[in-house]
Amino acid sequence: MDIKKNNSGNIVISPEVVEKIAKTAALDVSGVFDVVPRTQDFKSIVKSRKVSKAVNCTIRDGQYIIDIYLKVNEGVKLTELATKVQKNIKEAVQNMTGTVVTKINVHVCEVQFKSAEENKD
């Protein structure tokens, strides 16, 4: 939890709120199809019964580190898309929370291909 103190008391921002802001900001970027739960190998699934999340926010030294897992549209330039996603998330989170985002790790997990019917057009 991110705790800010002022003369009136404490302001607490949970990581889940930051994750929702990041998800919304990522989905606003053209070329992002969806935010998806991260892929896990078999060993990770067996060892941990936790549900993997599509966005994960950790707080270190009062700064956010965000990991986001994306499904992107076919034909996008992945490095350009990832850079836009990072920029959009950083601006949104910092503007809404007032806390510095030090790192945004964008993981492209899937590609959404056009269906065979759409390709016939």
Image: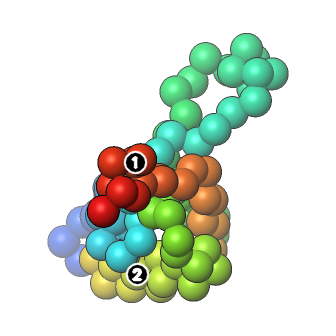
Amino acid type indicated by mark 2: Asn
Colour scheme in use:
rainbow
Q: Quadrant of the C terminus?
A: bottom left
Q: Which mark is residue 115?
A: 1
Identify the element where label 1 is drawn: loop
Q: Nearer the viewer, residue 21 or 115?
A: 115
In the figure, residue 19 lies in which quadrant? Answer: bottom left
Name above or below for residue 18 compared with residue 7: above
- Total number of numbered labels? 2
> Can residue 24 be seen at all in this image of the molecule?
yes
Earlier-in-chain disc, 1 versus 2:
2
Q: Nearer the viewer, residue 115 or 92?
A: 115
In the figure, residue 61 lies in which quadrant? Answer: bottom right
- Relative to residue 121, is residue 53 drawn left or right? right
Residue extending farthest to the right is: 43
- Relative to residue 6, is residue 19 drawn left or right? right
Name above or below for residue 98 compared with residue 23: below
- Relative to residue 116, is residue 97 drawn left or right? left
Q: Position of residue 116 (x, y in %)?
A: 41, 47
Q: Position of residue 56 (x, y in %)?
A: 52, 51
Q: Residues within 10 Å of mark 1 (few under 14, many from 20)?
A: few
Residue extending farthest to the left is: 8
- Relative to residue 3, is residue 24 drawn left or right? left
What residue is rendered at 76% in x and 21% in y?
42
Q: Which mark is residue 42?
A: none
* Alpha carbons under labels 1 and 2: distance apart: 29 Å
> Can residue 64 be seen at all in this image of the molecule?
no
The residue where tag 2 is placed is 88
Q: Position of residue 2 (x, y in %)?
A: 43, 61
Q: Position of residue 72 (x, y in %)?
A: 48, 61
Amino acid type indicated by mark 1: Ser
What residue is rendered at 55% in x and 34% in y?
52
